[in-house]
Structure formats: C-alpha cells, structure tokens
Image (tube, grey):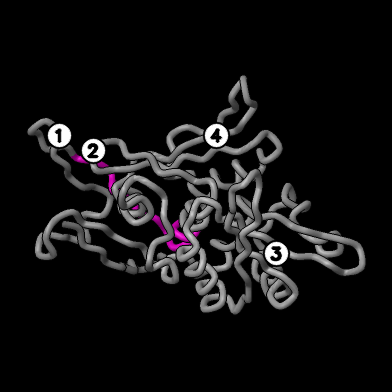
Amino acid sequence: MYIVRDLEPQGSSKIRLICWKSVESCDPTDIGFLHRQSAGKSVIIKAMSLSQTQEQIVAGLLLGDGYLEFDKFKASRLQIKQAKCKRDYVFWLYSQLAEKVKTPPKQRLDTMQWYFSTRSLRELELWRQIFYPKGKKVVPKNITELLCEPIALAVWFMDDGTLDYRIRSHYSFTLSTDAFTVNEVRLLQYTLLKNFGIESSIQTPSSRGKKYTKLYIGKSGREKFLETIKPYMLKCFAYKLPPNVA
C-alpha cells in the first residue's frame, strides 16, 4: 500500500511524501529513497516527489497530449512530444520538471519533433493508475481536486486548445476532448465552473460521419478563461489568443 503525507520542512515549501509501506514505518527523514522488490532482491530507488506546481502541470498535460508509460517496476514516466514550432514550450516544460528528467529535450531527425521524458517515478505511477485505470486514458472522477490552479488550465489549453477569432470582437476558445466520453466532458465542464468560475458548453461536431466532443468557451466564459490562463501563456502560443491581448 502507499501512504501520502504532506510535509513542510523548515525553510521550504510543502512537499508530498509517498511511502510504499505502512504508516508506522513511514519515516519523514527518509525522503529521497524508497525500496522495491525486483527478482527477489530489495532495490533502493529515488523517491522524487512532485511539487504542487509540477502536479498541476502533470494534470494539464494528461488532459492534453501528455502520456504516462509504465516501466513494469511499479513506476511510470511522463512522455512529452511536440511539433518543431513548439520547441519553446517543450523547453519550458523541461525547465519545470528538470530535476525529474535525466536527459534534456532532443529533436527527431525524421519528424523534427521535440521530445523528452521524465525518470520513472512511483508518484507518476499513482497518476497513471488514476488516468489509465484500464489502460485507456479517462477523466478521473476526482478531477475537480486535480485540476484546480490556473497553470494547469493554461497547460491543458497550450497542449490541446484552439482559438476561433473573427473581426468585430468575436472570439471563442475550444478545448479538444475527443478522447473522452460525454459524461467525462460534463465533469470537465463542471470543473471549469466550480474551480475557475468559467462557463462553457459541450459541442459535438461531426467529421466524416463521426462525432467529436469538445468543450466550447464562448461569450459567457471567454473573458474569465482568458484572465485565468493569460499569465502562463508562452509567446509561441500567441496565435491561440485574440490579437489585442496576445
């Protein structure tokens, strides 16, 4: 089993300690190392807990293009891959997760995409179990507790959002939720309203006979949405913001 404890050492911000043993044997002074069993042997591995900001970034990424890969040893790593034009975004993500990453971003020679992955971490395995309970990505039932800060919403939008802008003050935002069920998208809609006060609607446009579910943020919610995400938007995503505020 695992135990989650929030600790606040003197002179530092709150961190989260995950102990894969009993409460009684979970020693706060052991932050940094955990044990795992592999081929009958006890192996010491690093326990690199995520900061609150990193957790919010992970939440936003997993609602977007981020992917968690299981390493078969009770740990998972986060995979990041973006187009050439989003190089600055990849390096910004790397800067936020650097101490959890072994190798800096690299560029593929065939697709020119930029990519990197984190180390395999047991805390990320907890996230994988939440977002991939049966192998397919879902919206967790407790998403209101996971997606709760502006930076998470901004990362989700930078990853998987679009702007519809037309002259004469018309603009709206869309969050692509094609991979999720309508009920899951309703939960995301509720999360936007509850955590950020952002009103949205669910649209199901069709393409080649197939319906795609999307979260649409129109006139009633666009100003609040823009106010929430703008402080975190990178310059390479200026095209996702109305020209007068980019």
Q: Quadrant of residue 173?
A: bottom right
Query: What range of the chain is rendered magenta?
Result: 44-56
Residue assigned mark 1: 38
Q: Amino acid at mark 1?
A: Ser
Q: CA distance from mark 2 to mark 3?
A: 39 Å
- Earlier sequence position, callout 4 versus callout 3: 4
Q: Using the image, tell me which numbered label, if any, was put on residue 53.
A: none
Q: Amino acid at mark 4?
A: Tyr
Q: Amino acid at mark 3?
A: Lys
Say whether marks 2 and 1 touch (CB < 8 Å): yes
Q: What percent of the width, then of the height, locates residue 132?
A: 36, 50
- For the point 65% across and 56% down, which residue is it? 205
Say whether marks 4 and 2 touch (CB < 8 Å): no
Q: CA distance from mark 4 to mark 3?
A: 25 Å
Visible residue check, residue 143: yes
Residue assigned mark 4: 115
Residue assigned mark 2: 73
Q: Amino acid at mark 2?
A: Phe
- Disc 2 on helix, strand or loop? loop
- Earlier sequence position, callout 1 versus callout 4: 1
- Disc 4 on helix, strand or loop? strand
On-image quarter of the N terminus: bottom left
Q: Using the image, tell me which numbered label, if any, was put on residue 230.
A: 3
Asked if residue 237 is positioned above or below residue 77 in the image, the reply reads below
